[in-house]
Image: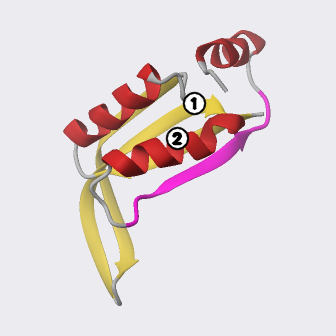
Amino acid sequence: MYIVVFITAKDVKEANKIAAKLVKDKLIACANIIKGVRSVFWWQGKADKANEVLMILKAKHSCFKAIMKAATLIHSYDVPEIIALPIIDGSRDYLKWIEESCLA
């Protein structure tokens, strides 16, 4: 099974560092880094907001635990958003590329 993983980061530098590590370790096939995300959320008993960067990662489900572990070690947040959604269908060539790009 293939997944899309969302991770928010405090800035592009942090997102690039996380993405580079995950690609180097062959835990993800690719990372899209999107600047200019405005997040509104509940944190420590009150509503809060922040400018963030959104990472959209493509990977195999079997890599998810390792992705979480590696990203958490680099991430500056106490509770980073690291969530996965299943890819239910896609281009055969693209899914094959994910398969060949990831180790696990």
23 sits left or right of 66 in the view: left
Question: Which of disc 2 and disc 1 is earlier in sequence?
Answer: 1
**Residue at (51, 48) in percent of width and height:** 68
Where residue 52 appears, as percent x and y from the top left, is 28, 52
**Residue at (34, 62) in percent of width and height:** 39
Highlighted range, magenta: 79-89
Please state which of the two labelled residues, at mark 1 or mark 2, is closer to the viewer.
2
- Asked if the residues shown at circle 1 and circle 2 are in contact, with their CB atoms under 8 angstroms apart, the answer is no
**Front residue (pair 104, 86):** 104
Confirm whether the magenta stretch covers residue 80.
yes
Q: Quadrant of the C terminus?
A: top right
Confirm whether the magenta stretch covers residue 96.
no
42 sits left or right of 13 in the view: right
The residue that disc 1 covers is 58
Label 1 – label 2 distance at C-alpha: 11 Å
85 sits left or right of 14 in the view: right
